[in-house]
Amino acid sequence: MSKLNKLKNVITAMITPFDENLVLDEEKYREFIRFQIDNECHILTMGTTGESATMSHEEHHHAMDITVDEAKKSGKDPFVLAGAGSNSTKEAISLSQYAENAGAGGVLIVVPYYNKPVQHSLIDHFSAIADSVSLPIILYNVPSRTGRNLEPETISKLAYTKDNIVGIKCASGDIDQITRIIKTTPDDFIVLSGDDSMTYHIMALGGKGVISVASNIIPSKLVEFTNSMLNNEWKKARDWQLQLYDLFKVLFVETNPGPVKYAADIMNIMENRMRLPMTPPLKENQKRIKNVLKDLDLI
């Protein structure tokens, strides 16, 4: 369980740098990974924020290899989580097995999108993936994107029947449901926020941290925020929550990762290149993002 103890605090759902031809820019990606690790974040490669839905499996493999390699070179031993979900169980198994062979610490498996499988089908889907690898698996529930909610009873069954299903990223926005997940899963089941603005609430209930979008641009602040909660410094955490709330919300003024990639660009972290169908934010939303960044003295 020692490696799993790292699944807390901040895991950055990393944005992906593209070159002028919209090909993954390996040099920039390595530089960005080092930036995250130097700021004490763990890292997720090929999550939604990394535009995984527009990338081929070969590109997923390349991104995983780069991320694992940079993590090893860092000497800091961050946890490397790899997005390996798919609406095809066969494809999710293939990506998960590649992640394991590449040396990732665990895989993040989203609820199958578009298919809308019922709950007993979801149990079969996640069980098949769990049986195919020995890696720790973090479930990912984001019904706004997948069209299907992963119910607490289903999560509990998976947690109790599959030893390597060790946690969940919660992005349902439903605090009552998240409370039920924490109440009905094993004590060592890892609950992570999948929504920066809900991190305070989820960690107050016993969550361990956040798979974060905002940490792409403010990694050290997010680490301070989550550390304060893990250290039971709730007044400090509340102050962070209120200070960062507008940023958390404006980064979702349009579909992620459009806003955070735009913010990263104007903060000189990464150029704002995206693959269609994703596009940069509208001018009025760019202005809103800029205003929040100025208020926080980030630009």
Image (cartoon, rainbow, N blue to C red):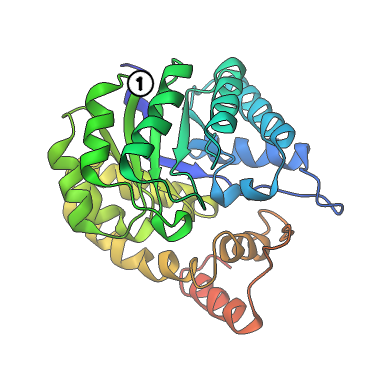
Is there any visible trace of residue 74 in the rendered image? no
Residue under the point 30% across and 58% down: 198
Residue 155 versus residue 179 in the image, above or below: above
| Image quadrant occupied by the C terminus | bottom right
Q: Residue extending furthest left?
A: 183
Residue 120 versus residue 287 in the image, above or below: above
Q: Position of residue 176 (x, y in %)?
A: 17, 57
Is there any visible trace of residue 2 in the rendered image? yes
What amino acid type should be assigned to the residue bearing mark 1? Asn
- Left or right: 111 as drawn, with respect to 57: left
In this view, the residue in front, 220 or 287, is 287
In this view, the residue in front, 235 or 211, is 211
Q: Residues within 10 Å of mark 1 (few under 14, many from 20)?
A: some
**Residue wearing tag 1:** 164
Residue under the point 31% across and 43% down: 119
Residue under the point 62% across and 21% down: 73
Q: Position of residue 138 (x, y in %)?
A: 39, 33
Q: Residue extending furthest bottom?
A: 284
Q: Position of residue 114 (x, y in %)?
A: 52, 53
Mark count: 1
Q: Position of residue 42 (x, y in %)?
A: 47, 35
